[in-house]
């Protein structure tokens, strides 16, 4: 999982795919954190992406950097604890102008049953599960 986290941090932007009814939705994200041994992402409760994750927590993310890419498929689980939100916002202090642990809007989700696959044009794919 640490290798997945490191790749996402270095890529800086990854793309999160959700489903809205029967239509795919993809958007850029940048937050990723490890808290209590789990890989977390962050969003706002008022956003459509939050509603889509709650409705169908099966998501996939994809990131690309230096000729390599990563796909992570899994289920996102909402963690509404203050400590989990604070850990994420402490890792991204620049978000504190828009989010706060106590604002009723900040949401953090962790991956469950995740399968991450590293790809490149020059080597065989490598898969890790967490």
Image: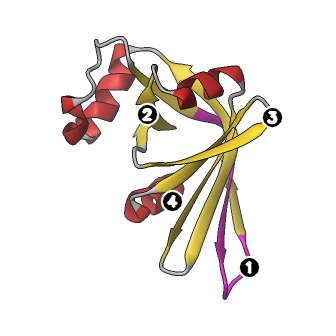
- Considering every residue shown, the one lying at the far bottom of the view is 122
Residue 126 is left or right of residue 91, and the answer is: right
Reply yes or no: does residue 23 show up in magenta.
no
Marks 4 and 3 close (CB-CB < 8 Å): no
Where is residue 17 drawn, in percent x and y? 64, 45
Of the residues tagged 2 and 1, which is closer to the observer?
A: 2
In the picture of the structure, the residue carrying the numbered disc 1 is 124
Looking at the rendered structure, which numbered label has been put on residue 109?
none
Circles 4, 1 touching at the beta carbon (< 8 Å): no
Principal secondary structure, stretch drawn in magenta: strand
Does residue 114 appear in the picture of this structure?
Answer: no
Task: Give the residues drawn in magenta, as a range.
Answer: 111-125
In the displayed structure, does residue 66 sit left or right of residue 74? left
Q: Is residue 110 left or right of residue 21?
A: left
Specify which label sits upstream in the sequence, 1 or 3: 3
Residue at the spot of label 3: 22
Label 1 near label 2: C-beta < 8 Å?
Answer: no
Which residue is found at the position 29% from the left and 13% from the top? 103
Percent x, y of residue 36: 44, 31
**Disc 1: CA contacts within 10 A as few (<14), some (14-19) or many (>=20):** few
Q: Quote the CA–CA distance across marks 4 and 1.
A: 17 Å
Q: CA distance from mark 3 to mark 2?
A: 24 Å
Residue 84, quarter of picture: top left
Label 4 sits on a secondary structure element that is helix
Distance Cα–Cα, label 4 vs label 2: 19 Å
Q: Residue at x 53, y 56 (%)?
A: 4
Measure the C-alpha gap from mark 1 to mark 3.
32 Å
Which quadrant of the view contains residue 13?
A: bottom left
Q: Which residue is mark 4?
A: 3
């Amino acid at each position: 999982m640490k290798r997945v986290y490191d790749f996402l941090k270095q890529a800086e932007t990854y793309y999160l795919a959700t489903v809205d009814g029967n239509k795919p939705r993809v958007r850029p994200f940048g937050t990723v954190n490890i808290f209590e041994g789990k890989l977390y992402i962050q969003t706002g409760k008022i956003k459509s992406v939050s509603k889509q994750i709650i409705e169908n927590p099966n998501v996939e993310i994809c990131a690309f950097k230096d000729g390599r890419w990563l796909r992570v498929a899994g289920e996102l689980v909402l963690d509404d604890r203050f400590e989990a939100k604070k850990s994420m916002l402490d890792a991204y202090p620049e978000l504190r102008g828009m989010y706060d642990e106590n604002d009723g809007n900040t949401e953090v989700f962790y991956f469950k049953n995740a399968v991450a696959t590293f790809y490149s044009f020059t080597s065989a794919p490598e898969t890790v599960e967490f």
